[in-house]
């Protein structure tokens, strides 16, 4: 029988997060490579799970399980670990994949350790090579990539960084949905307000268009130039680290290894050099346009469209053209 890859799908108040879909895409790709099958499991109360389970069942997976209990309505590490541990004992997957969210990183190491395993955290990809399962992890702030292989029989655990796979590549299908009453043991902690991925209202990981500003913008008073282009395109404004460090834009708009990892349809980089710490946060974008006056800027290595020029000439003209085109 085919081995199973189980994806733990995260929902919040009945809404799926996109990194879970990306993780499913990673699982589908791996399964295809080795003839394995993908299953998905969601945890929560009955009311929270109905809609997201339906959504996942429309993907190419063998089965979706709703691991239900009122005691799982609010996240606690005790509750989630106990419920998943009992479920894993029955479902016996070879591999458990999880999105690398705050919630998952809170409980997944405990879950893996309780089964004598480890979590390969924050992976950016996975593949089979000569029959061996390898996970890619970035090291030293993205300067190196390491291939991590697994010892022992499993179940093995790995989490994927946001932007590692494209959610819109999810293969469609039709899967049965099963409900399992979760075995939740003693919960020793009292749940408080849920984790916030970003403090502000903006969640850059969900943005389809991002206009990102670097030190080439020169002064804080020039930020509205980029904001006007973002408004014209209906996108979100983001920045490289020096811009946020200087307080010109809020910290939660920083893209990169110590900021957010984004994968919009369009990433427009204005006056950003393309340091590796920035690139790791945006290289998963579908289309990258970079405007930089230095033809040798490293950002051009990942750009689909490279515009060599002065952003102060180009951006206002571009904004006008976008406005005209959009009526
Ligand atoms: C541990 C660590 C973590 C880090 N994390 C992050 C992170 O999360 N995100 C991040 O972004 N950085 C991060 N950095 C910093 C990173 O190394 C770079 O210093 C930073 O990304 C550079 O930002 P920049 O491209 O805006 O500025 P610069 O490197 O100074 O580049 C400015 C660019 O603007 C161009 N330019 C100048 N004037 C114009 C003009 N008029 N028109 C067009 N182009 C122009 C220049 O040619 C240049 O390429 C981190 C560093 C460390 C050590």
Image (spheres, grey):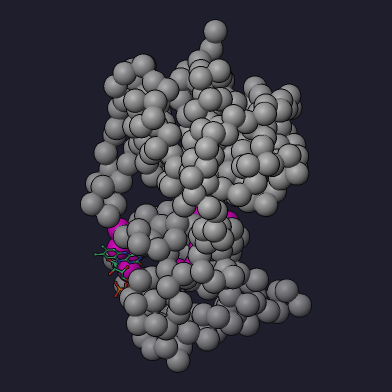
Considering only vertical position in the picture, is 143 above or below 267? above
Considering only vertical position in the picture, is 141 above or below 294? above
Q: x%, y% of residue 253?
A: 47, 70
Magenta span includes 266: yes
Q: Is residue 293 visible to us here?
A: no
- Residue 316 or residue 113, whichever sits in front: 113
Considering only vertical position in the picture, is 21 above or below 64? below
Q: x%, y% of residue 264?
A: 55, 57
Q: How many marks?
A: 0
Picture quadrant of ligand 1:
bottom left
> As drawn, is 208 to the left or to the right of 85?
right
Residue at 71% of width from left, 25% of height from top? Answer: 178
Q: x%, y% of residue 248?
A: 42, 83
Q: x%, y% of residue 11?
A: 62, 46
- Residue 135 or residue 267, whichever sits in front: 135
Q: Is residue 283 visible to us here?
A: yes
In the rendered image, the quadrant that contains the C terminus is bottom right
Residue at 63% of width from left, 82% of height from top? Answer: 320
Q: Please report the bounds of the magenta region as a residue range.
A: 263-276
Residue at 54% of width from left, 58% of height from top? Answer: 192
Considering only vertical position in the picture, is 95 above or below 187? above
Magenta span includes 28: no
Residue at 47% of width from left, 52% of height from top? Answer: 102
Q: What residue occupies the far bottom of the structure in this picture? A: 221
């Amino acid at each position: 029988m085919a081995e199973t890859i189980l994806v733990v799908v995260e929902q919040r108040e009945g809404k799926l997060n996109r990194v879970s879909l990306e993780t499913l895409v990673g699982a589908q790709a791996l399964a295809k490579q080795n003839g394995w099958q993908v299953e998905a499991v969601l945890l929560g109360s009955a009311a929270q799970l109905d809609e997201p389970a339906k959504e996942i069942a429309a993907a190419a997976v063998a089965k979706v399980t709703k691991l239900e209990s009122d005691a799982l309505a609010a996240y606690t590490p005790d509750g989630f670990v106990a419920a998943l541990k009992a479920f894993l004992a029955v479902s016996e997957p070879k591999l458990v994949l999880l999105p690398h969210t705050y919630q998952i990183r809170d409980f997944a190491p405990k879950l893996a350790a309780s089964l004598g395993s480890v979590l390969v955290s924050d992976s950016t990809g996975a593949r089979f090579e000569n029959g061996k399962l390898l996970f890619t992890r970035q090291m030293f702030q993205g300067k190196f990539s390491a291939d991590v292989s697994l010892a022992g029989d499993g179940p093995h655990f790995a989490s994927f960084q946001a932007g590692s796979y494209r959610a819109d590549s999810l293969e469609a299908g039709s899967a049965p949905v099963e409900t399992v009453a979760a075995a939740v043991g003693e919960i020793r902690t009292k749940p408080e307000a849920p984790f916030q991925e970003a403090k502000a209202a903006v969640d850059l990981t969900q943005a389809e268009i991002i206009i990102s500003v670097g030190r080439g913008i020169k002064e804080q008073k020039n930020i509205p130039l980029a904001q006007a282009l973002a408004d014209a395109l209906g996108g979100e404004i983001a920045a490289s680290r020096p811009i946020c460090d200087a307080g010109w834009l809020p910290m939660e708009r920083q893209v990169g290894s110590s900021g957010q990892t984004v994968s919009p349809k369009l990433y427009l980089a204005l006056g950003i050099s393309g340091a590796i710490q920035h690139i790791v946060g945006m290289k998963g974008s579908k289309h990258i346009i970079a405007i930089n006056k230095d033809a040798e800027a490293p950002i051009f290595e990942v750009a689909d469209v490279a515009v060599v020029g002065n952003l102060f000439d180009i951006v206002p003209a571009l904004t006008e053209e976008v406005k005209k085109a959009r009526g």
